[in-house]
Amino acid sequence: MWTRVLQFLKEPTGAALAKGSLVVLVFKVIGALGGYVLLFSLAKAGGELSVGVYEVAFTVLVIGSTLGRWGLDTVLVREMSREAKSGGLSRSLYIAVFFRVTAITSLVALALFFGASFLTNLFFEDTPKEILATAAIAILPFTLMLLNAEVFRAIGKTILFSINQHGTIYIVIAALLWWIPLPEAMAFADTAQFALILLLGLSALFFIVSTIYILSLSATEVLINQPWKGQLFKIATPMLISSSLFLVISWSDTLMLGYFLPEERVGLYRIVFKVATLITFAQFALNTVVAPMVSAIHRDRSKLHELAHKVAQLNLITSGPVFVVILLFGTSLIGIFGVSDPSEAYPWLVVLAFGQLTNAFSGPVLNILNMTGYEKSARNTMLVVAVLNITLNALLIPAFGPLGAAYSTTLTMVGWNVWAASLVYKYHGVIAVPFLTKYSRKND
């Protein structure tokens, strides 16, 4: 076993993946721990209802942020990683994307701010409209912080990328909620509101500092080769649709649970969901490093095959053991968050865990499609699966509650991963699934 690991690390591709992924993974674990402590702090201060209200508001914030970026962040990674490989880093690309994202996000934030009352009455029984209004204000700095993180991702600065994630924000918020003495009579809504205000302030701080640094790094002169010139929205729109539909799949269960059930049940489901995502911790870190690498080598079939093989090896080593631990100790993991009856939620966890394992083992299929010019195929895949996801949620949640949401999420996650993996094989002859990489096509 150790011999294989050492051999893996000696090879240039394996070493690059392991080094970059390890940095992101460490920060991801720290950020996730902060997220779990935040859930615990919210539950301690305002109960499961406080967790549910905060998660509802954060869901809306994430959806608004995704719309605001319009897929331009993915274009930024693709084009900037290619510029970085050739020794350039144009300020013009960053500024062009920055102002477009700022304009779109501002419109989204205004729409959400003035529509907070309508959304509250439609979806969220116990969520005060002021909570969504605060989330609307936080969208702009939060979005721009994440946009800057993608710049660091494109140029290989994984530490800076990891710092400028909401996981880092979670750590600080969780620490403040843990150490600041809150009034015992503080309402659940006040607790959630306080956490969102902290999110707003910290996102703004991170955005300002990272913007100053990026401008100092980028070249003031315009690069001669600018294939993105005049094409930003044309390239970005399919990517926006893909990422938006991915959010539909990831968050529609939460929103539809909020429509059919009280926020307490939403809060419990989100706790279980976060436990299940432990399986894809390493995959997130790996995808962070893989995307710009794929963009840089996408025309070299042999290097792409080598990269897919290494990705499959890392996914097997990192995700498989976590899946087994969740199956064996899932009830105890749920109970850590103060859930009164964790055994009730354990079946939800098992179902969600299978979906997460499929996601991990399939490899970075959407990243490969988006980074190699097949963003429209990725869009079409997610469009079909998102419709299926909403349909299944609408049918299964009223009948089975959170268990129905878990089944809907897992079935659609398996569906889009299998289909996207087949497209990657069709276009590139690449398979990044453990034990199956040997079936990759070596020639066109």
Image: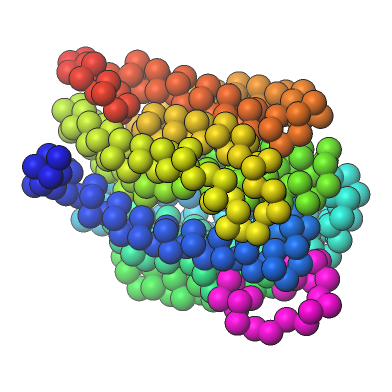
User: Can see residue 223?
Assistant: no
**Visible in this render: residue 317?**
yes
Residue 50 in picture, x, y percent from top left: 75, 62
Residue 176 magenta-drawn?
yes
Estimate the x, y position of residue 437 in percent, counting from the top left.
Answer: 24, 23
Quadrant in which the N terminus is drawn = top left
Residue at 64%, 76% (x, y): give it.
Answer: 177
Q: Tell me which segment is drawn in magenta.
A: 173-194
| Picture colour scheme | rainbow
Q: Nearer the viewer, residue 400 or 364?
A: 400
Q: Quadrant of residue 122?
A: top right
Specify the quadrant of the image occupied by residue 410. top right
187 or 208, nearer to the observer: 187
Q: Quadrant of the C terminus?
A: top left
Q: Is residue 409 above or below residue 281?
A: above
Q: Is residue 381 above or below residue 235?
A: above
**Place of residue 203 in the rendered image (x, y in percent of width and height, measured from the top left):** 57, 69
At 69% from the left and 32% from the top, the residue drawn is 403
Residue 270, image x and y in percent?
A: 65, 48
Location of residue 141 with respect to 292 vertically, above or below: below
Residue 270 highlighted magenta (yes or no): no
The residue at the point 23 percent across, 55 percent down is 19
Determine whether, in the image, residue 375 is placed left or right of residue 118. left
Question: Of all residues shown, which one is farthest toward the bottom?
Answer: 181
- Residue at figure coordinates x 36%, y 37% from the top left: 320
Q: Is residue 76 left or right of residue 42?
A: left
Q: In this picture, is 416 found above or below 353?
A: above
Prevailing secondary structure of the magenta residues: helix
